[in-house]
Image: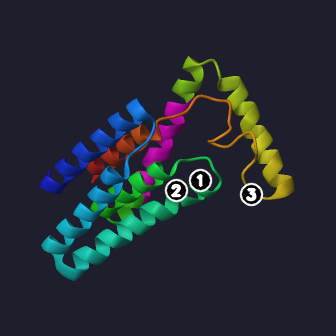
């Protein structure tokens, strides 16, 4: 295991813990750690490292940005995946997003089940899909992150799990 993978593991662990406690991931962590990744990879890999890190950040941001624009995910979660991508690079950012989505689905089932919300969650999902079919893909008032009635997921936990899975399987 390389030193930067240990650093990234610690960073996503901190981010997940803060998200569970405060339901937000601060910019000092997401943007600061992304800047540290860019600096580290530039130092170690020169312009190639710089490009690789910036591309990873961009891919990470780009993959979850649509969910933020649809008001289904917070900006901190988007930046958290971007931070992981800055450390991992663009290809591994895609893998991390995939593993994070799987972990997020498991987390949603656990939280929904714990709160007795699973049936309502599946009805809401069906309602959202019907809305998108008729109105196009856009936020559905009453089912956004700001005004949805369901329990909130600390999605930083899912992103941390996806990042750790990516590191482990690299």
Expressed as whole percent of the image width and height from the top left, the position of residue 80 reads 39, 52
Q: Are marks 2 and 1 in contact (CB under 8 Å)?
A: yes
As displayed, is residue 109 above or below residue 101? above
N-terminal label among 3 and 2? 2
Q: Main secondary structure of the magenta part?
A: helix
Label 1 crowd (10 A; few <14 / some 14-19 / many >=20): some
User: Gap in Å between the C-alphas at discs 2 and 1?
Assistant: 5 Å
Label 3 crowd (10 A; few <14 / some 14-19 / many >=20): few
Q: Which residue is mark 1?
A: 67
Q: Residue at x 31, y 53 (%)?
A: 28
Which quarter of the picture shows residue 19?
Answer: top left
Expressed as whole percent of the image width and height from the top left, the position of residue 40 reads 18, 66
Expressed as whole percent of the image width and height from the top left, the position of residue 128 reads 76, 44
Q: Which residue is mark 3?
A: 137
User: Gap in Å between the C-alphas at discs 3 and 2?
Assistant: 15 Å
Q: In this image, 146 relative to 53: left or right?
A: right
Q: Which residue is mark 2?
A: 64
């Amino acid at each position: 295991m390389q030193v930067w993978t240990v650093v990234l593991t610690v960073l996503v662990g901190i981010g997940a813990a803060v998200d569970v406690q405060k339901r937000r991931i601060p910019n000092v962590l997401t943007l600061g750690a992304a800047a540290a990744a860019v600096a580290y990879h530039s130092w170690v890999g020169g312009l190639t490292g710089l490009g690789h890190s910036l591309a990873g950040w961009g891919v990470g941001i780009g993959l979850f940005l649509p969910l933020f624009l649809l008001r289904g995910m917070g900006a901190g979660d988007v930046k958290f995946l971007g931070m992981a991508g800055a450390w991992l690079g663009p290809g591994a950012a895609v893998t991390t997003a995939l593993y994070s989505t799987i972990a997020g689905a498991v987390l949603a089932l656990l939280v929904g089940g714990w709160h007795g919300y699973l049936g309502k969650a599946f009805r809401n999902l069906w309602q959202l899909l019907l809305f998108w079919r008729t109105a196009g893909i856009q936020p559905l008032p009453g089912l956004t992150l700001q005004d949805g009635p369901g329990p909130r997921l600390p999605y930083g936990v899912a992103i941390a799990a996806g990042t750790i899975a990516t590191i482990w399987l690299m």
